[in-house]
Image: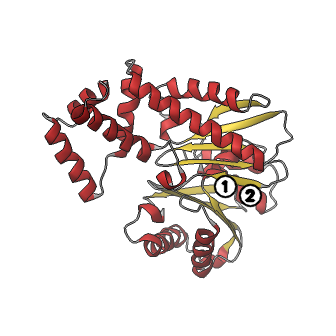
């Protein structure tokens, strides 16, 4: 059993890394979405998808699940004890007998902070705040979009773009550059044609989340007040979530490391929301010192570092980072 498996599964893509302990080398295979919340077949499709993905990387090397000494699965869409039970059951049924299962937000901590403790904020497709403290206790907030009051991530901001544009075009509440930007982007000539396009997205289930969300950042960069307010609100909601997390998860560190992951944080569309986030954090947790860091490593580094740690390998983060440096 000379092999370890690290998995980062999300709503857009999934990464598998197979690590050879004996040769100290790794191989990456990338796939599509594996989050049951974004798959038409829900849990059943998630099960078959992860089964197929893991089979493909193992078969390439003539391995079976029994050859894997340990695996770490960081998966989006794993937010409750019930979800954990369902997903744990079918990974166990795959034949992986020794594995660690967690929400993918924890991989951000393991990837971005070598000592493996701190806080991670996700603003990708969805919204999430999670933490691991020095005692290895963990806690997480958000993950169910509007149901849990999340205000961040591409899906929420994409909907906010549509809502704000609709308010401007049909209710004339406030003028916003957003309307002009979105109509130019999608070559829409009238407000009624705009609604036809929105209806098409709703019927097909193919809302262009990244480009819709980016419209807010582009408009904010041009000084659009409505867009700036949206980004400031997003920053405030993340800061409040960090404050709530710290009530539940005490940290002894003098400085708390906070890692930001997901395209809305890392793609450098604007710095307005990042500046607002720093200010809101100071307002909400002013008694704590913190350092914000945009994740510069692939999140699957967190899964690989974690599984090396579980296997008892020394300096797991450094070894994981060196192995992935040869791939990326």
In the image, residue 213 sits, relative to residue 280, either above or below, namely below
Q: Position of residue 231 (x, y in %)?
A: 48, 31
Residue depicted at 65% across the width and 78% down the height: 66
Secondary structure under tag 1 reads helix
Residue position for label 1: 304
- Residue sitting farthest toward the top: 223
On the image, which quarter does residue 75 sit in? bottom right
Query: Is residue 117 visible from the viewing direction of this image?
Result: no
Neighbours of disc 2 within 10 Å: few (<14), some (14-19), many (20+): many
Secondary structure under tag 2 reads helix
Tag of residue 269: none
Residue depicted at 68% across the width and 37% down the height: 258
Q: Is residue 225 left or right of residue 90?
A: left
Q: Is residue 67 left or right of residue 328?
A: right
Neighbours of disc 1 within 10 Å: few (<14), some (14-19), many (20+): many
Tag of residue 308: 2
Q: Marks 1/2: CA distance?
A: 6 Å
């Amino acid at each position: 059993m000379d092999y370890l498996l690290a998995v980062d599964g999300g709503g857009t893509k999934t990464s598998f890394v197979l690590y050879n302990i004996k040769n100290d080398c790794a191989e990456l295979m990338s796939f599509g979405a594996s989050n049951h919340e974004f798959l038409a077949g829900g849990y059943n499709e998630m099960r078959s998808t992860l089964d197929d993905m893991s089979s493909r990387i193992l078969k390439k090397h003539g391995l079976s699940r029994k050859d894997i000494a340990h695996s770490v699965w960081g998966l989006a869409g794993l937010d409750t004890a019930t979800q954990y039970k369902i997903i744990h059951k079918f990974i166990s049924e795959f034949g992986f007998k020794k594995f660690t299962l967690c929400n993918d937000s924890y991989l951000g901590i393991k990837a971005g902070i070598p000592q493996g403790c701190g806080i991670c904020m996700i603003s990708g497709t969805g919204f999430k705040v999670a933490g691991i403290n020095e005692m290895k206790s963990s806690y997480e907030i958000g993950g169910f979009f509007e149901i849990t009051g999340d205000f961040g991530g591409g899906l929420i901001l994409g909907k906010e773009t549509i809502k704000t544009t609709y308010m401007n075009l049909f209710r004339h509440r406030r003028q916003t550059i957003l309307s002009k930007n979105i109509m130019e982007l999608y070559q829409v000539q009238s407000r009624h044609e705009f609604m036809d396009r929105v209806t098409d997205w709703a019927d097909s289930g193919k809302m262009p989340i990244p480009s819709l969300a980016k419209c807010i950042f582009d408009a904010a960069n041009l000084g659009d007040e409505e867009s700036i307010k949206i980004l400031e609100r997003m920053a405030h909601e993340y800061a409040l979530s960090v404050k709530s997390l710290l009530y539940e998860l005490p940290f002894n560190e003098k400085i708390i490391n906070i890692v930001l992951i997901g395209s809305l944080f890392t793609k450098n569309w604007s710095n307005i929301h990042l500046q607002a986030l720093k200010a809101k954090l100071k307002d909400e947790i002013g008694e704590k010192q913190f350092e914000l860091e945009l994740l510069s490593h692939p999140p699957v580094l967190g899964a690989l570092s974690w599984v090396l740690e579980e296997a008892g390998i020394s300096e797991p983060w450094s070894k994981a980072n060196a192995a992935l440096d040869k791939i990326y």
